[in-house]
Image (spheres, rainbow, N blue to C red):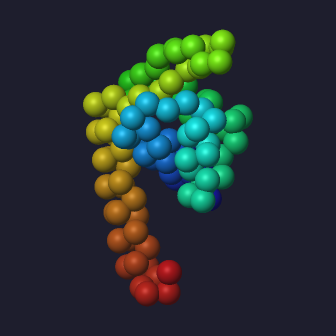
Amino acid sequence: MDIQIKKGVLDACVLYAVKDGESYGYKIINDLKGIIEISESTLYPILKRLESSGALETSSKEFNGRLRRYYSITAEGKRRLKELKSDFEEVVKLYKKIFGDRL
């Protein structure tokens, strides 16, 4: 898969996983099982990039004596998720024009 397409798919999956409320890394990985396989070494750079772009915000809370980092989607993240969905729909239309019903 093209690296730029894969990046967009992974970003969309992570944003989708936190769209209804805050979450943390291990839970995001488990929530995405059955949708896409993603490892911790792949997830955390995505979370950092989405946070840097303003799509996610973070907070830390104590859990079992340790601080756990929680991620929440921002208004920018919701806008980005909507944009990624629109991009995907355009790609699907293009592929259908090229390949017809043989997808």
Q: Residue at x 55, y 47 (%)?
A: 31
Residue at (28%, 31%) from the top-left corner?
Answer: 75
Residue 21: percent from left, percent from top: 39, 35
| Quadrant (top left, top right, bottom left, bottom right) of the N terminus | bottom right
The reply, left or right, for residue 82 in relation to residue 95 is left
Q: Nearer the viewer, residue 13 or 2?
A: 13
| Residue 28: % across, % down | 56, 40
Residue in view at x 35 percent, y 54 percent: 85
Using the image, determine if residue 21 lies above or below residue 16.
Answer: above
Q: Is residue 25 visible?
A: yes
Q: Is residue 74 above or below residue 8?
A: above
Describe residue 90's horizontal placement relative to residue 45 as left or right: left
Give the mark count.
0
- Residue 93 position, x and y percent, is 35, 71
Q: Dividing the picture into quarters, in which one does residue 34 lie? A: bottom right
Location of residue 95 by image quarter: bottom left
Kindly give the residue lying farthest to the front in the view shown: 64
78 sits left or right of 92 in the view: left
Measuring 40% from the left and 64% from the top, which residue is drawn there? 91
